[in-house]
Amino acid sequence: MDIMMPPGAATRRLRAAAFTDRTLLARASLDAVRKLNPARLVRNPVIFVTEVVAILATLLAALAAGRGEAWSFQAGIAAWLWLTVLFATFAEALAEGRGRAQAESLRQARGDARAKLLARPDDRALWQPRGATELKPGDLVLVEAGDIIPSDGEIVEGIASVNEAAVTGESAPVIREAGGDRSAVTGGTLVVSDWLVVRITAAPGSTFLDRMITLVEGAARQKTPNEIALDILLAGMTIIFLITVASLVGLASWNGTPPSVPVLAALLVTLIPTTIGGLLSAIGIAGMDRLVRFNVLATSGRAVEAAGDVDVLLLDKTGTITFGNRQAAAFVPAPGVTERELVEAAVLASLGDETPEGRSVLVLARERYRMAAPAVPAGARVVPFTAQTRLSGLDLPGGQYRKGAVDSLARSLDATVPPALAEAVDRIARQGATPLAVSKDGRVLGAIELKDIVKPGIRDRFAELRRMGIRSVMVTGDNRLTAAAIAAEAGVDDFLVEATPEQKLGYIRTAQTEGRLVAMAGDGTNDAPALAQADVGLAMQTGTQAAREAGNMVDLDSDPTKLIEVVEIGKQLLITRGALTTFSVANDVAKYFAILPAIFVASYPELGTLNVMRLTSPESAILSAVIFNALIIVALVPLALRGVRYAPAGAAALLRRNLLIYGLGGVVAPFIGIKFIDLLLNLFGMA
Amino acid sequence: MTWIGWAQIALVLACVVAAAIPLGRYIAVLAAGRITVLAPLERLFYTAAGIDPAKGQGWRAYTLAMLAANAAGFVLLYALLRLQGGLPFNPQGFGDLSPWLAFNTAASFVTNTNWQAYGGEVAMSNFSQMAGLTVQNFLSAASGIALALAVSRAFAKGGVQDLGNFWADLVRVTLYLLVPLSILVGLAFVAMGMPQTLSAFAEATTIEGATQMLPLGPAALQVAIKHLGTNGGGFFGANSAHPFEGPTALATGLQIWAHQVIPFALALTFGAIIGDIRQGRALLLVMLGYVLMATLAIYASEAGGNPLHLALGIDAAQGNMEGKEVRFGQALVALFSATTTGASCGAVNAMLESFTPLGGMVPLFLIQLGEVLPGGVGSGLYGMLVFVLLTVFIAGLMVGRTPEYLGKKVQAREIKLAMLAVLVLPVAILGFTAVALVLPAAIASIQAAGPHGLSEMLYAFSSAAGNNGSAFGGLTADTPWLNTTLGIAMMLGRFAYVVPVMAIAGSLAAKPRALASPGTFPTHGLLFAGLLAGVILILGGLQFMPALALGPLAEHFSLLAGKTF
């Protein structure tokens, strides 16, 4: 079984829009032009400066044309400067467009549901029709089979099966009932059978579905802390290069004439970090989008970033690390008893045990010993398992078979467990498993080992986490002995036993004061404080309203294991940003070699030696650099939207790899690119 | 280049590193206030000034104390220079300095720049030298080291405000580090033939029978602190090239050692203060790597000689000897020039203007890179830490976490302040140079034609803003315009830089210090050292490339093409 595959993946509704989707591209192109509005662009200092420079270059080209001077070179620079800006706004528009397509389908789900507003909770007959948007928190509504739940709420009364495909994409209905951990309902989902009385908890416009739409649209997107810091760095670098270029007016006038303004504009735009400046917001939107397509909703980009920083992962044992039910794992015969004898007796004794544990004995016997369970023979008497006797059995004419908890069995038979077997029983208990004893005609034949089975593959995931520098902590209600054994088998770094909500909260606080960031998954109301305290709290969609509000992410598939992937998505987002920043900055080296000789060659022809790319002419050199600078943005859009490849590894290994690709690559790529563009320009006689 | 030359370079640098290791730990102990040999004397200072040395200061209080001390030093020095003619110990009867020159000189010595628009033996009385300049040599150096200690403490613990006490740091660094080392090194210089006297100039008769005035003075001790404090202001106008200021190759070797040992040691002090010496070692490695590369570049370029001279049949084995002392030779001149400009010292033992264009570009570029290789005493370390934060921020994202250095998250506030600091050099260097190159009053000061003339001006502002103080030469710096703008550039380079850096320290000190894990960005290995070196080159150097292309590079390629100006 591949646990990396989240349940419901096959029915995933929120699918990635392809890069080549025509309508999407057309819409994005239109938006890209709309985003040229300087008042909006000022949020992005690098591209804003580029636009100002483009305007200046355009004016100068027009003036030159008006005076009847040569203007084609100036117009060429101006055009490519405009394209640089356009490519940047296009990247952002494309990232937003992919989210908008998802928002559209969500809006349809919301529709305009009608609600049945109840006056009193105990009288389901008396209701008034209301529009869903008119509901206030605290209102009680009746939802019957075939109705769409009008808004988010808590079930006050009733039990029903609900199809939540509108939100989760999973079409199999789920049971929702009053009380317990399954009492929250989401507006926009459909009641398939029975009825519910729901107390509305969300104000109009702020329901889960509304929040989801805003999120995927990116409308209320705010810059994350890390994005702000990066913006400042890029703005700072832009100012530095502005000074550099402006000072050339004075410096170059010392022994010659200063370069023309369009040429200085070209130098400036190629030096300032337009690549990362143009792609930065697209990277952020796409990161959020990846999470949404993974069926996880984050309340803010800040939470996604925090996920990348997580040092400690708190995971519930049951359902996350183990399958959550004890299963037979081995048969241990007493001295003088053959294994076959024991297995036969165990199978017969378990025929009357309908519990999952009892079934698992039959499964083990069939799979490992090829011993199919016989039908209950005629004349036999089944002793069914009860919680009181903790025994099950079968009375045949040929013998009395019993199976049950070791002490219960011994007491009921008034028999003693052979010392050798007692030792084995102790060993099983010490390893955190549960021993069951099997008897025939009052004689103890041996023991069955019941174990909580650790999910296959999870051990590798924890090893992976460890390589990433993340400690995994298992949270369980088991005693220390059992927990230690499972922890060792699953390979977690630490475990929290007999965990109460207060203990969880305390553990998180302690880790945080040590300077660690903690992520946890939870669904119950008593998880809410811990979810709120954790830096990343992943609440389950099936959980209570309290838990969903306390966490900063909601998993629509309700699969706590996905916390691991959420961390990876967070890391991938940060890595993409870092990689493209490094690439962008490293690009400057080659651009100097293209432009500096070109602009100074008039004053000092000898500086032509620095033209290591052997670019044809000063004009073609400058134009090639500007064109490369613009095209590289488009070339990197798919990477920005998809994110760079991320394989879990230690920081040192990741750094080495990314530095090689994006650092060294960033130095080398423009040399090749600029030379190639220069060749093309000359091939077509454009320079 | 010769094996002997390389052996000299290796020997001096080996002595620097060997001494820096124990000295770095010693400074950390000293900074913790655990050296109490002169406790009564210390107490005397504190009681007289009404200071409680145990009371810690936040970044604001610490910075204000430093600014107050430096402002007072500036006013005192300015007054002293303006009134020099009426003050004692003036056997040569030198007059008062002009207001421009006094401003420039006071700014220069307060900021640890020691740019000299005057010639020591023709303008400064013994009193000005000792009570004015030498005092500032100690104070500006101690201020720099104190600031570096405060910044280091910001990384040591989590959630604190306290960066130490400026006054206590100042007193301890002076008493337990600068004074004893200066006495030791000064005595060694005396033994090597440097004068240390209060008598007037001596009159001597040369072999040819002519009379000559031999300038004397309390040189040896001032030269010791000139190097140990990376001040660089020569007692004599010719600085360490003067026979009395740089008498032998051994003396020049000791001078190199003296202006390298504390900056290198402070990198290790940083490691000791934060409790992880490997971090300091990585910084030291980057510094040492650059020093070696720069020395190699100068050595190769100078030993290669000037192609135009070689074409005239000059002995190629000598290399370019113009402006160099034969008693030092090419190797020690190359090492001296690389270290003095890398370390913001600014002493010179050869005339940089006479270097080949590329040989002269290296010192210029080292200054422009931000004076962090290894930089001035203290200022080198905190400047390097700014680059470290930027490196961690840019590349740190590539490991998939919010960038952090030593467990301290690097966020918007730190980046904003770091960029403010990084902006100072381009503004002060490129801005002032560009203005000077179109202003007739400033152009008149330039001696050489062609790109070399641009280099003269570019070097002057680089040297001033980088608080280096060395002169390229050729430039007539003692004019009202240059005295004023260079003085402002020095002030910007020192104080406009350090205030944001201290604000970063304050911000980082308050942050919790997260524990390291395999997922945190490693900042102690070779990979990081290489990365840091690259970021210094790109963020510190790229902005100066066009200017360098118009200066030394244009000159170099013209020279190769046989063209002179």
Image (tube, coloured by chain):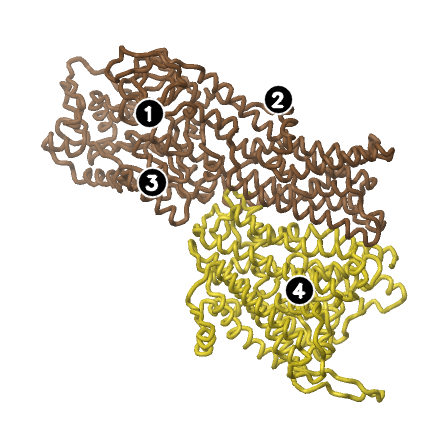
Chain colours: A brown, B yellow
Q: Dot 4 falls on which chain?
A: B
Q: Circle 4 is placed at which residue position?
A: B468
Between marks 4 and 1 in the image, the one whose residue lies nearer the viewer: 4
Q: SS of the residue at dot 3?
A: helix
What chain does mark 1 sit on?
A
Subunit of label 2: A
Q: Are marks 4 and 3 on the same chain?
A: no
Task: Name the disc covering residue B549, or none.
Answer: none
Q: Give the residue at mark 1.
A: A367
* Amino acid type for the residue under numbered disc 1: Glu
Query: Does mark 2 fall on the same chain as mark 4?
Result: no
| Marks 4 and 1 share the same chain | no
Q: Chain of mark 3?
A: A
Q: Which mark is residue A487?
A: 3
Q: CA distance from mark 1 to mark 3?
A: 26 Å
Name the residue at 84% across, 51% down: A256
Q: Residue at x 62, y 41 (%)?
A: A661
Q: CA distance from mark 4 to mark 3?
A: 61 Å
Q: CA distance from mark 2 to mark 1?
A: 58 Å
Front residue of A7/A397: it is A7
